[in-house]
Image: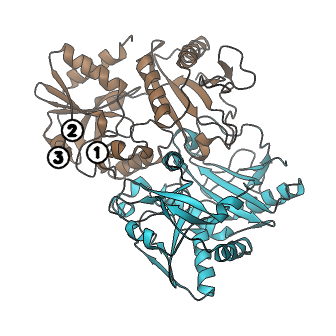
Chain colours: A brown, B cyan
């Protein structure tokens, strides 16, 4: 198996003084992915104080690269981090993919992970990395996943009333998302749909929810402290091409059980159809899901 | 200034296979604190998936070491991590302090930070570190701090109803705590008291709340998804010695403004008296707070 590829971003933001010593001008440099590259007192580790993105790379092409970079910048803003230098990040992602492939990493599906942190405590200088590796094999998940709903603990409007809770930012503070997945496993399921305390379906720990009823395909609107999905946007494009109506709205969690089809969609895993929600079985139209995943894997923007 | 001291815990938990290659038998080893020691794909960084403790060290003595170790183990349990080998961690803390002092780190107040993560993704082997350094100078905070209340977004009973939200665990996913402190700064304050959506005073981002009315000293009871405070326990011991009644209970946030005195208490910073809460001034009994801090700094257990 090909070793992973790792770049340190030596100029992660455009803020004065954000460049690391030894910044070469390109703003990034290849480093040994098998060696430790993070200092213990990096606030990304000690406080989960940073943001990230995970990008699918198919046939060497990073999918929805610009939307991912824009979301990285949006998350950084919500955390009061300096604005990432997106030109540096874009070139680093492309360089990382090229390096990985020329080192023999020629699997059809790779992923690139972008991490931007507040940096080592006391330095005031953010840290950044781009990591490229072979994607996990998600063939089984693309056939079907079992899902449970779990309380997220927040009202649907908490991003508006209490922005310091950082709902809607893709932060490194994902321990509760991971705990939700362990709770799902305890209940015999593969994944989670979080529900607000006032009863609205929100999102998965690392995915968006897609709900089809007849000719209408819906997803929870993103003013509910949920992440605007880059893959979800492409899923809507697929359904629009096929003549479906697509709608962003508040979706009561109780309506999920009445859907004709449900998917959790995300980068890398793409569209995973739900075969069972809290014990209620769902019929999967395998052909439609296969077409959807083929569409997602073929994206060239 | 003396360089920080860093130990890698080579046997962080007692689970079979948890020892790193090269574990020497002691379960820890000194490493270069100025060099990167963390791998990028450590889940502690990529998902904030780990737990920590910060321990005051005064005159070479780690304060409340056993309660801190017990809390580390409790947090690990809430995250379904294997049980930390507390004997290894205890010896590592003591060794780290001794190394730091013999390298010239003879400031009266140091701190030790313990970090236990789920480890590098895919290895199934947790990571652990103990970091020892000179404490920040908290003289000013021990004279008085300005505090604002902020919504934590959760009901007071969320730890009971929704344990996957990990309230009550001291996790590395602290981005929202840091964002709360930035919001406090925007409001001209130094610190935060979080309030539940149903109106109860909870805790600070890294402290417990102490409320005195007359002869009664109270703190919010810990079944509200808040962290059982090691320093708070010592604060109660101080007040009990002085003949005060000490009480754990649910404290409506609205009652805070009617307190005779308020403190935020935590390791390292110790007791910080509140001079202003949401714009309401409080009188600080400087002598009492000084006696309390002298008591806390003199702890030998």
Q: Which residue was labeled with disc 2?
A: A250
* SS class, disc 1: loop
* SS class, disc 3: helix
Residue A143 at x, y percent in the picture:
29, 29
Residue B267 seen in this snapshot: no
Q: Are marks 3 and 1 on the same chain?
A: yes
Q: Are marks 3 and 2 in contact (CB under 8 Å)?
A: no
Residue at left offset 83%, top offset 55%: B100
Q: Exactly how many numbered labels are in the figure?
A: 3
Q: Which residue was labeled with disc 1?
A: A156
State the mark number for residue A254: 3
Disc 2 chain ID: A
Quadrant housing the C terminus of chain B: bottom right
Mark before the other along the chain sequence, 3 or 1:
1
Front of the two marks 3 and 2: 2
Whole-number angstrom distance, CA of label 3 to CA of label 1 = 15 Å
Q: Are marks 2 and 1 in contact (CB under 8 Å)?
A: yes
Disc 3 chain ID: A
Q: Specify few, some or many for label 2: CA neighbours under 10 Å numbering under 14, 14-19, or 20 or more.
A: some
Please, is residue B289 above or below residue A119 in the view?
below
């Amino acid at each position: 198996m090909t070793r992973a590829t790792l770049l340190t971003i030596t100029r992660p933001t455009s803020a004065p003084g954000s460049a690391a010593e030894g910044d070469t001008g390109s703003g990034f440099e290849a480093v040994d992915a098998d060696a430790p590259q993070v200092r213990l007192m990096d606030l990304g580790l000690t406080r989960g104080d940073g943001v990230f993105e995970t990008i699918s790379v198919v046939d060497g092409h990073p999918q929805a690269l610009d939307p991912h970079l824009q979301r990285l910048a949006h998350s950084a803003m919500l955390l009061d981090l300096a604005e990432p230098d997106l030109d540096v990040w874009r070139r680093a992602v492309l360089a990382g993919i090229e390096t990985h492939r020329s080192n023999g990493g020629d699997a059809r599906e790779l992923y690139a992970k972008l991490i931007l942190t507040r940096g080592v405590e006391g330095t005031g200088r953010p840290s950044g990395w781009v990591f490229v590796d072979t994607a996990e094999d998600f063939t089984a998940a693309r056939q079907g996943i079992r899902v449970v709903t779990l309380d997220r603990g927040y009202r649907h409007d908490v991003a508006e009333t209490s922005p310091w809770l950082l709902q809607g930012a893709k932060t490194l503070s994902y321990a509760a998302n991971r705990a939700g997945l362990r709770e799902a496993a305890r209940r015999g399921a593969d994944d989670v749909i979080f529900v607000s305390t006032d009863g609205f379906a929100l999102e998965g720990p690392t995915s968006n929810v897609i709900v089809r009823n007849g000719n209408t395909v819906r997803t929870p609107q993103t003013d509910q402290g949920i992440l605007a999905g880059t893959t979800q946007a492409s899923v809507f494009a697929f359904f629009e091409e096929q003549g479906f109506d697509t709608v962003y709205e508040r979706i009561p969690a109780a309506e999920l059980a009445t859907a004709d089809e449900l998917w959790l969609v995300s980068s890398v895993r793409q569209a995973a159809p739900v075969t069972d929600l809290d014990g209620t079985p769902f019929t999967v139209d395998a052909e439609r899901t296969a077409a959807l995943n083929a569409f997602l894997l073929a994206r060239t923007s």
